[in-house]
Amino acid sequence: MDKYELVVIVNAQLPQDERDSVSKQTTDYVAKGGGKIINTQMWLDKFKLAFPIKKCQEGTYYLTNFEAPTASIVNLRESLRLNEKVVRYAIYNASR
């Protein structure tokens, strides 16, 4: 299993419980794919974006460090892409 870093930007206009639920859903996606969560934290709260993304001016950044099989990353990306509360995401391979 490789180590990964996941950064998820959620619309900051959503209520706090909905933003936290997106973080919880993300950890659930990783666990379903056979991964192991190392660390999850709110990185930046209500940070002004450099340019609007999906008509969103501010975002809340969540950082998740995890280990997962390489094959499960495709399913994780698909799940994040389909989640309407996720403005943008990035997955980095931290093993390299």
Image: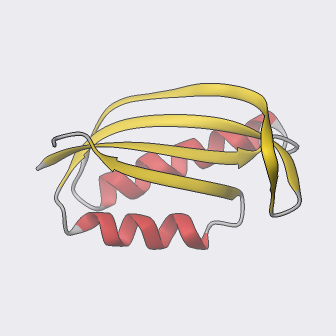
Way the structure is coloured: secondary structure
Q: Residue at x 35, y 53 (%)?
A: 30
Q: Is residue 87 left or right of residue 6?
A: right
Q: Is residue 58 left or right of residue 69?
A: right
Rendered position, 15 above or below 42: below
Q: Residue furthest left?
A: 1
Count of marks placed on residues: 0
Rendered position, 76 above or below 94: below
What is the quadrant of the C terminus in the image? Answer: top left
Q: Residue at x 66, y 57 (%)?
A: 86
Q: Residue furthest front?
A: 50
Residue 94 position within the rendered picture, expressed as x and y whole percent measured from the top left:
24, 39
Residue 82 position within the rendered picture, expressed as x and y whole percent measured from the top left:
59, 73
Residue 17 position within the rendered picture, expressed as x and y whole percent measured from the top left:
74, 38
Q: Quadrant of residue 4?
A: top left
Q: Nearer the viewer, residue 34 or 9?
A: 9
Q: Is residue 82 left or right of residue 39?
A: right
Q: Residue at x 21, y 56 (%)?
A: 34
Q: Residue at x 78, y 34 (%)?
A: 16
